Amino acid sequence: MRVFAVANQKGGVGKTTTAVTLAGLLAQRGYRTLMVDLDPHGSLTTYFGLDPDTLDHSVYSLFQNAPHPDPAALVRATRFANLHLMPASSALATLDRQLGAREGMGLVLARALMQCAAQFDAVFVDCPPVLGVLMVNALAASHELLIPVQTEFLAMKGLERMLHTLGMILRARKRPLPYLVIPTMFDRRVQSSLESLAALRERFPDVLWNSVIPVDTQFREASQHGAPLNYLNPQARGVIAYTALANHLFAGDAPVARTAP
């Protein structure tokens, strides 16, 4: 099982779109795929038609009953084969105040996913845009980090904060966490987008994905249908770009199994 955190300390850069689309593409390929919503805003949860304000069983339950007796019981199947969701609750916003100082709170998600390791091939954790117990959990649980960065100059500051946070986490983690910066919402017609991409290539050449995710209004339409865009229009330019990213991340890999748990 490979666990990816999708994180950036700036909102609106395409974190949820990245998690949903990569997960949808892998599910179509037969990977048993889990999406974990760690954001109290619950965008990923809402995407699939659930209300984070009313859920009784969610990721929050992991922290209420750490260690949770059966994390798999919190996983919900979507209407797409091989694609599953561990939803968020808006109560996640209270965790830092309630439990942040309690010993072991940074490893709750890692321990829960270890209990589910035999059931999934790939996991995508959609992170909140702030440093706290939730992001610490995501980075502690993950094998790889994906950092979507909108190609505009304000987003560069979010990337700098994210890399600073990553440095702090790595000092505590004591093992490497490979990461990939993904330029998103790229519009070649806009000069600021071109300049931002050039700046990313100049400053982060060793960790920057060699392509881009373009602006594509069909992502918004897909969210209204509660479906990853690849199920609605596999030829959409955004899907083609994320397919290239999935190929990059999973080159040479094959799914362990082709049936849902």
Image: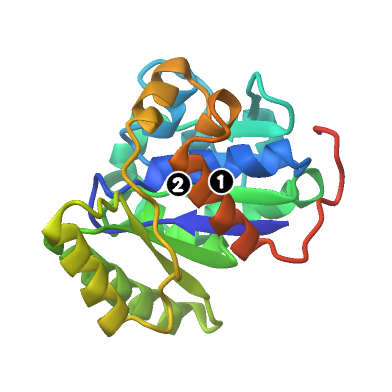
The spot of residue 5 in percent (x, y) is 49, 57
Q: Write the residue at 61% across / 57% down.
A: 3
Residue 22 got which mark? 1
Q: Is residue 228 above or below residue 94?
A: above
Where is 224 relative to 109, above or below? Answer: above
Residue 200 horizontal/vertical position (percent) = 27, 74
**Residue 57 x, y percent position in the rendering:** 54, 24
Please provide percent x and percent y for residue 135: 39, 57
Name which residue type carries label 1.
Answer: Leu
User: How would you rate the neighbour count of disc 2 (Cα within 10 Å): few for under 14, some for 14-19, many for 20 or more?
Assistant: many
Query: How far is the residue under mark 2 from the one under mark 1?
Result: 6 Å
Left or right side of 2 for 213: left
Contact flag, marks 2 and 1 (Cβ < 8 Å): yes
Q: Is residue 203 left or right of residue 253?
A: left
Residue 56 left/right relative to 192 = right
Can you say which quadrant of the picture contains the N terminus? bottom right
The image shows a total of numbered marks equal to 2
Residue at x 24%, y 74% (from the top left corner):
198
Residue 70: quarter of image:
top right
Quadrant housing residue 114 = bottom right
Res. 37 in view: no
For the point 67% across and 24% down, the residue is 80
The quadrant of the rendering that contains the C terminus is: top right
Q: In the image, is 97 to the left or to the right of 102?
A: left
Vertical side of 1 occupied by 45: above or below: above
Label 1 crowd (10 A; few <14 / some 14-19 / many >=20): many
Residue that mark 2 sits on: 18
Examine the rendering and report whether any part of residue 138 can be seen: yes
